[in-house]
Amino acid sequence: MNHSATKPLVELSHVTKTFPTASGMFSALKKVSLTIPKGQLVSITGKSGSGKSTLLNIIAGIDKPTEGGVRINGIQVDKLSESALAAWRGKNIGVVFQFFQLLPTLTILENTMLPMDFCDSYPKKERRDRALLLLDQVKIKEQADKLPSALSGGQQQRAAIARALANDPPLIIADEPTGNLDSQTATSIFELFAELTRTGKTVIIVTHERDFFSYFENTFVITDGILTNEPLNA
């Protein structure tokens, strides 16, 4: 591995996020500091309402911290303007959702090409071949011309991962990606994420599935907005 593999891809320093509520200000995150090196598969776990989604949104640049700094791949993302942030996110973050979020009227191939069309990241004539290559990588190339409804849950999640990889982002964020899948299918999806980190991607997964914690190089636990690092296999 080259030396750059040890450089942090994600750096959060003293991040606080507060929201106004009927009963006053609510702190969803409290002085969270976090470093994730390139090429790691890490998990964030915690009870419902503990701040996991807020943390993911801040890492993805969907939300900005009230206080503190967020640096991803050397870019101080909390300082970017909204338009610069949208362009940056399109090329640097791939997001995988629990419910796949594939567009039902587009084929799997078209769904995979969509981020390239949005970001204009690859020449038009290359996009189809690149999408097919990604579908091959996630082992569903033969489903390329089908609509999402014709695929199983596991196949749809693979398609969602291919789409997340479309613009070759350094960071993949997955929110409960196996929450809807049976354990055998879930295992194959975790294998796929582990494989991606071997190609240099950094993958952050929010999950409750303790059976899969052996896949992670690091596990962070968030409780009432406070982040702690949990020793693995504890």
Image (cartoon, rainbow, N blue to C red):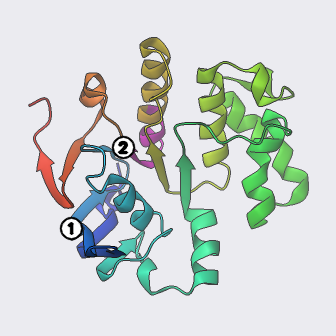
Amino acid tagged 1: Val
Q: Residue at x 72, y 55 (%)?
A: 115
Q: Residue at x 61, y 54 (%)?
A: 168
Query: Which residues are the magenta region?
Result: 195-205
- The x, y position of residue 41, in whole percent, is 34, 42
Examine the image and state in which quarter residue 57 appears.
bottom left
Which mark is first along the chain, 2 or 1?
A: 1
Q: Measure the alpha-carbon separation of dots 1 and 2.
A: 16 Å
- The x, y position of residue 105, in whole percent, is 86, 38
Q: Indicate yes or no whether the magenta region holds residue 198.
A: yes
Q: Is residue 116 above or below residue 77?
A: above
Q: Is residue 40 above or below residue 225?
A: above
Instruction: Tell me if mark 2 has few (under 14), some (14-19) or many (20+) residues whose alpha carbon lies within 10 angstroms of its own.
Output: many
Give whichever of 61, 50 is nearer the camera: 50
Give whichever of 205, 137 is nearer the camera: 205
Amino acid tagged 2: Val
**Which residue corresponds to mark 2?**
206
Examine the image and state in which quarter residue 158 appears.
top right
- The x, y position of residue 50, in whole percent, is 25, 52
Q: Secondary structure at mark 2?
A: strand
**Which residue corresponds to mark 1?**
32
Q: Looking at the image, which residue sits at the far top?
A: 184
